[in-house]
Image (cartoon, helix red, strand yellow):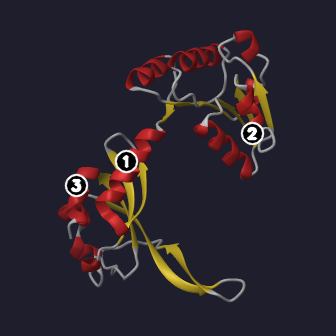
């Protein structure tokens, strides 16, 4: 697939290089020549260009891209102008970094629906990790209020059935999935733990030690789980 990443600061560079590593064709764009030099050997192509200049922006293969990322982190005006120009040029799918609530409101008003907020995501992950400690495995924000959490099953759950635990009734969270560990040998014969998803979740399923629970709900209700 083909991607355009506009703004090669820390986030933009990370996105561009990650997409490239998994086999995509990525073009990076930034007005700062030093940032271009930093990525020109690690992605498909890098171009120094002022994205607030409509004529310059129009020289890019916008309609060939599967998605265009706009990742400016501080320059409110440059981000807004760039997004407006891209919308005016009928660019394909736009993914824009949100800078502030006002910035997000403005870009939504001109038709952007996919907004990424790395600072908020980090804060949410850190808060979740602080809440669960070593039990925490992964966090994903679905909406501003509801999140997905992967946690190690509490010791008090081990040996109990899902019907007995009743996560939704007793804890206000919905069980989405369970990953169960199994010790296997790798290609060179060393033992390692591999996790597999339990495909059928029923009320009579018994929680085992080491199970990872994938839960959906609000962060505030998870305090009940964190305290047991």
Q: Quadrant of the N terminus?
A: top right
Which residue in the protein does label 3 denote? 221
For residue 52, which quarter of the picture? top right
First in residue order: circle 2 vs circle 1: 2
Image coordinates of residue 180 in percent, x first then y, are: 46, 77
* Depth check, front residue: 3 or 52: 52
Which residue in the protein does label 1 denote? 124
Label 1 SS: helix
Q: In the displayed structure, does residue 160 sit left or right of residue 60?
A: left
Label 2 SS: helix
190 versus 124 height, above or below = below
Q: Mark 2 or 3, which is nearer the eye? A: 2
* Depth check, front residue: 69 or 28: 28
First in residue order: circle 2 vs circle 3: 2
For residue 156, which quarter of the picture? bottom left
Residue visible at 75% across and 10% down?
55
Image coordinates of residue 146 in percent, x first then y, are: 33, 47
């Amino acid at each position: 697939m083909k991607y355009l990443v506009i703004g090669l600061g820390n986030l933009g560079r990370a996105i561009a290089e990650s997409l490239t590593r998994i086999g995509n064709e990525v073009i990076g764009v930034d007005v700062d020549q030093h940032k271009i030099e930093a990525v020109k050997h690690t992605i498909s192509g890098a171009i120094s260009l002022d994205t607030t200049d409509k004529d310059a922006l129009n020289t890019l293969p916008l309609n060939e891209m599967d998605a265009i990322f706009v990742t400016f982190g501080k320059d409110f005006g440059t981000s807004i102008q760039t997004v407006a120009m891209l919308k005016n040029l009928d660019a394909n799918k736009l993914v824009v970094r949100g800078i502030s609530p006002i910035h997000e409101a403005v870009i939504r008003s001109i038709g952007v629906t996919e907004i990424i907020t790395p600072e908020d995501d980090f804060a949410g992950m850190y808060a979740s990790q602080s809440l669960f400690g070593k039990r925490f495995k992964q966090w994903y924000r679905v909406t501003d209020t509801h999140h997905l959490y992967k946690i190690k099953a509490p010791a008090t759950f081990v040996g109990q059935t899902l019907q007995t635990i009743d996560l939704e009734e007793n804890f206000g969270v919905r069980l989405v999935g369970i990953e169960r560990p199994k010790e296997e040998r790798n290609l060179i014969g060393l033992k390692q733990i591999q996790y597999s998803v339990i495909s059928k979740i029923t009320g009579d399923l018994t929680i085992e030690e080491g199970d990872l629970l994938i839960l959906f709900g609000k962060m505030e209700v998870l305090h009940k789980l964190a305290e047991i």
